[in-house]
Each structure stands twice: as structure tokens, then as C-alpha cells.
Amino acid sequence: MEWFTLKYIIAVLVGYLLSVYGGHLFVRLILRKYRYDMKNRGLKSGGAMIGYLERAIIFTLLLLNASVIIGLVLTAKSIARFEDLKKREFAEYFLIGTLSSIFFPFLVFLLLRPLL
């Protein structure tokens, strides 16, 4: 399939929108059950922005058939939270959020794959 057909461009744009914003709603829904008090820690809405970027990067890597690089995204995220991950409650919260966040772009990609 050619890269710049209208169908392809629309599918990619829809994929990004669903992966980034739909994924945000999905992760919030998942994390509602698992509250972690992050009061006075980090930037306001910093976690949401990290999630937007994470899902956009993952969807891009899937489009480029470079899914093996997704491990680097997860590694960078884990290194940034290394000290916090020593606390079991936060580690579970982090893993649930991260895994649900990366699941969503995969789901969107699989649904749109026939159009790509």
C-alpha cells in the first residue's frame, strides 16, 4: 500500500487521536480503582502528559514496524521512577498504569491495521 493515499493518512490521524486521547480516557478509567496520592510530588498533570507522549511514540513505532524499540520507552520510564518503584503500592500503581497505557495503542493499531 502506498504511504500517501488519503485512506492511509486518515487512518494514521485517527490512529494517533485514538491512541493518545482515547488511551488517556482508558488509563484514567483503569486507574480510578487504584488511587495513589501524589500530592506535592511532580508537575501538575505531568503523568497525563507522559502518557500522551508514550502512546504517541508507541503508535508511531507500530506504524514504522519498529515495535522492538518500545522496550526502550518502558526502560526510560522505569529508570525515571526507579526510587519510587521500591515502594510496593506505587510499583503496582505504576505497572497497572503503564501496561494499560501501552495496551491501548496496540489495540488501536490492530483495529486500524486493515486500513494501513
Image (cartoon, helix red, strand yellow):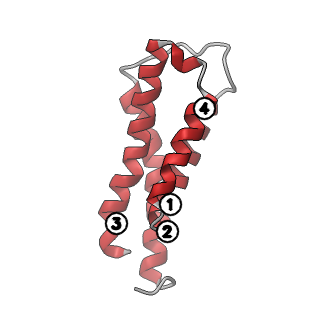
Crowd around label 2: few <14 · some 14–19 · many ≥20 (10 Å) = few
Q: Nearer the viewer, mark 1 or mark 4?
A: 4
Q: Is residue 29 left or right of residue 42?
A: left
Q: Separation of disc 2 and disc 1 at Cα?
A: 5 Å
User: Measuring 57% from the left and 36% from the top, which residue is drawn there?
Assistant: 77
Q: Residue at (43%, 41%) from the top-left corner?
A: 101
Q: Are marks 2 and 1 in contact (CB under 8 Å)?
A: yes
Q: Nearer the viewer, mark 2 or mark 4?
A: 4
Three-letter residue code for mark 1: Leu
Q: Secondary structure at mark 2?
A: loop
Asked if 53 appears above or below 87 in the picture, the reply is below
Q: Which mark is drawn over residue 79?
A: 4
| Earlier residue among tags 3 and 1 | 1
Q: What secondary structure is found at the residue carrying circle 1?
A: helix
Residue drawn at point x = 44 percent, y = 17 percent? 35
Q: Quadrant of the N terminus?
A: bottom left
User: Dot 2 corresponds to which residue?
Assistant: 64
Q: Is residue 43 above or below residue 64?
A: above
Q: Give how far apart the Cα atoms at labels 2 and 3 are.
A: 14 Å
User: At label 4, which amino acid type do we have?
Assistant: Ile
Determine whether the residue tagged by mark 4 lies in a helix, strand or loop.
Answer: helix
**Percent position (x, y) of residue 12?**
47, 68
